[in-house]
Amino acid sequence: MDVRDLFFWAAEANRKGLVRRTEAAIAASISRSDRDPKAIRQYMDSLRAEMMELEHEGEAEELDRENEKRIAKGRETMDVKRADIRAKRAAGESVNPKRYKIPAKAKVIR
C-alpha cells in the first residue's frame, strides 16, 4: 500500500459523497416542487463546482503559478520599456516613432 493509494481512495470517497448529495438534491427538488428554484439551482451549482474541484485537483494551482510567472515577465518587459522612454525624454529625443510622410506631390482623391 502506498500513500498515493490513500489519497486516491480519499478523493474517490469525496466523489461518491458528492454524487450521493447530488442525487439526494435532485430527488428532493422533484418531490418538493414548491421550493424556491433559485435556492435549488444555487445548491446544484455549488455541488457542480465541488465536483470540478475534485476532478481537476492540482491543475488550478499549476495554472496560477504559470500565470504569476507570465505576469512577472510582462512587468519586467514593461519596466524596461518605461526606462527606455524615460531615457529618451531625458536626452530630449522624440518618444513617438517617426511616421511615414506623404510626398507633397501625392494626389489627393476626393
Image: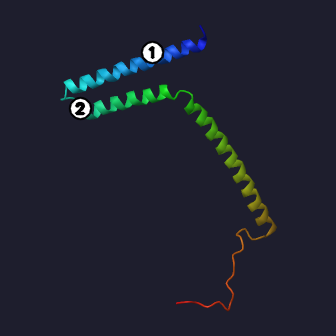
Closer to the chain start, of discs 1 and 2, is 1
Instruction: Look at label 2 and name its amino acid.
Output: Asp
How many C-alpha atoms fall within 10 Å of the one at disc 1: few (<14), some, or many (≥20)?
A: few
Q: Is residue 10 left or right of residue 86?
A: left
Give how far across and how far down residue 69 sits, in percent.
Answer: 67, 40
The residue at 39%/21% (across/down) is: 18
Quadrant of residue 99 in the image?
bottom right
Q: Residue at x 60, y 10 (%)?
A: 2
| Residue 14 x %, y % | 44, 18
Asked if marks 1 and 2 touch (Cβ < 8 Å), the reply is: no
Residue 67 image offset from top left, x and y in percent: 61, 40
Seen in the image, is 8 located left or right of residue 98? left
Residue at the spot 69% in from the left edge and 81% down from the top edge: 101
Residue 56 x/y as whole percent: 51, 29
Image quarter where the N terminus lies is top right
Residue type, mark 1 in image: Ala
> Looking at the image, is 49 positioned above or below residue 89?
above
Indicate the secondary structure of the residue bearing disc 2.
loop
CA distance for labels 1 and 2? 30 Å
Q: Nearer the viewer, residue 35 or 87?
A: 35
Report the label total. Answer: 2
Q: What number is the disc on residue 13?
A: 1
Q: Is residue 71 above or below residue 14?
A: below
Q: Nearer the viewer, mark 1 or mark 2?
A: 1
Residue shown at 39%/30% (left/top)?
48
Left or right of 27 in this view: 17: right
Q: Secondary structure at mark 1?
A: helix
Residue holding disc 2? 36
Extreme-front residue of the structure: 1
Residue 20 in the figure: left or right of residue 89:
left
